[in-house]
Image (cartoon, helix red, strand yellow):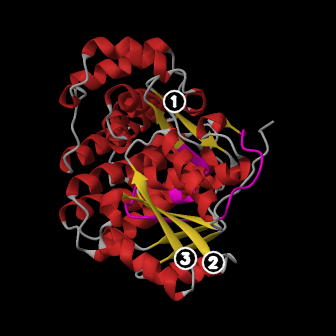
Amino acid sequence: MNNPINIEGVRKTIFGAGTIDQIGHECKALKTSRALLVMDRELAKTDLGTRVLESLRKSRIKGFLYPDVTPEPSPALADTGADMAKKEKVGCVIGIGGGSTMDVAKAISVLVTNGGKATDYIGLGLVKKPGLPTMMVPTTAGTGSEVTFTAVFTMRETKTKGGINSPFLYPHTAILDPQLTLNLPRQVTAHSGMDALTHAIESFTSLRAHFASEPISFKAIELISENLRGSVFNGSHYPYRESMMEGSYLAGLGLAMAGVGAVHALAYPLGSFFGIPHGLANAVMLPYVLEYNYPGNIEKFCRIALAMGEEEFDLTGRELAFRAVEAVFDLSEDIGIPETLVELDIPTDAVRQMAEAAIKVAVPIQNNPRPATVETIEDIYRRAFEGR
C-alpha cells in the first residue's frame, strides 16, 4: 500500500508585475509593526532596497536591514540574523533575493522562537515550534525557495552541506514579481533557470511523485524548456521572464511535494568541496544523472522529451526517452552551461571522495527513479569529466 500523501505549503502567493510594492500592506496584515529585511549587501544598495523600505514605511512598519547574506551561506549567518531579530523585537522576517537569502530568512524565523543555533536543526523534523511569519520575494527564477520547507547551509569546517527541513519553514507569503528579474545577467539567468529545471524534472521522476505533484512538475518542465533560452538571450522581454518565474514557482511546489533526486546528491559535494554554486552544480550534473536514470522510468522520460519539444516520429519508447537526455544537453549547450567537470576545475582524483559524500545525501538518493550506489555514482562523475 502506498504511503499517505500530505500536501502542505506556502499560505499565500501573490504573482504579477509590480507586486513588490504590496510588501508593506502584506506585512501589516501580519499584525506587526517591525520587520527584519534579509538581503545580500549588493542588492541592498540598489533601488530595490529603498523601494521595499519605503513600502514598509508607508504602512507604518519599521524595517531593520540585515544585509550580510553570502552565497552558499554558513549556519552562522542565520544565528547572527536571529540575534538581530530578537534585539529589534521584529514580528516578521522578509527574505528578498536568491535561494541563499530566502533560506537564511526562513532559518532566522524559527531560530527566534525555538532558540539555539542553526546547526541544532539541520536534519528532518527537528524544529519543534512555528517561527515568526515570513515573506519571501525571489529575484531570480530558479531556486523555488519561496515555497519550500528547506533552508540549506554549507558547513565549511567539515566541507558538507545540510538543510533544516521542517513544515514550520514554509513561508507565510510569497511575492513573485517578474519585473525584478528583468535584465538579470545571462549567467545568473542560465544557472538559476537550470536549477529550476532540475527541480521540475527530479520532482516529476521522484519515487514520491503523486497525482497532485506530477502535473505541476510537468507544467514547470514545459514552461522552463520553452522560455529559458529567450530569457537568457533577451532578458528584457517581460513575457519570457514572467513564464520563467511561473515555471520556477511550479518547480518549487513540485519539489516541496515530491522531493528531488540524485542530481542534488551529486551536486552537493561540488559545492561543499570546491565552492561551485548550487545552480551551476545542478546544471552540469543534470544531463549525466538523467542519462543514468532514464531506464528507470521510460514512460516518464518519454513525456519529458515531448515536453521539451522533441518529436516522436517512429522512435521506440527507449529511444524517445533518451531524447529527454539529449534535449537537456542541447539546452545547456545553447545557454552556455559548462559541459564537463573539467571546465569547473574539479580534480579527477576527487571522484571517490565526492561519491562517498553524495551517497550520504540519503533522501534524494532514496527518491531517485533508479537505485544508486557509490560505484554507480562514481561512474556518473566520470561521465561528467568525459563529456557528451
Up-down relation of residue 140 to residue 243 (above or below): above
Q: Amino acid at mark 2?
A: Ser
Where, by quadrant of the figure, is residue 233 drawn? bottom left
Query: Disc 1 marks which residue?
Result: 296
Up-down relation of residue 189 to residue 46 (above or below): above
Q: Earlier in the sequence, mark 1 or mark 2?
A: 2
Q: Amino acid at mark 1?
A: Gly
Q: Amino acid at mark 3?
A: Lys
Residues under labels 1 and 3: Cα distance?
53 Å
| Position of residue 203 in the picture relative to residue 28 (left or right) | left
Q: Please state the extent of the stretch shown in magenta in the rendering.
A: 125-151
Q: Secondary structure at mark 1?
A: helix
| Position of residue 40 in the picture relative to residue 358 (left or right) | left
Are circles 1 and 3 on residues that touch, CB within 8 Å? no
Are circles 3 and 2 on residues that touch, CB within 8 Å? yes
Query: Disc 3 marks which residue?
Result: 62
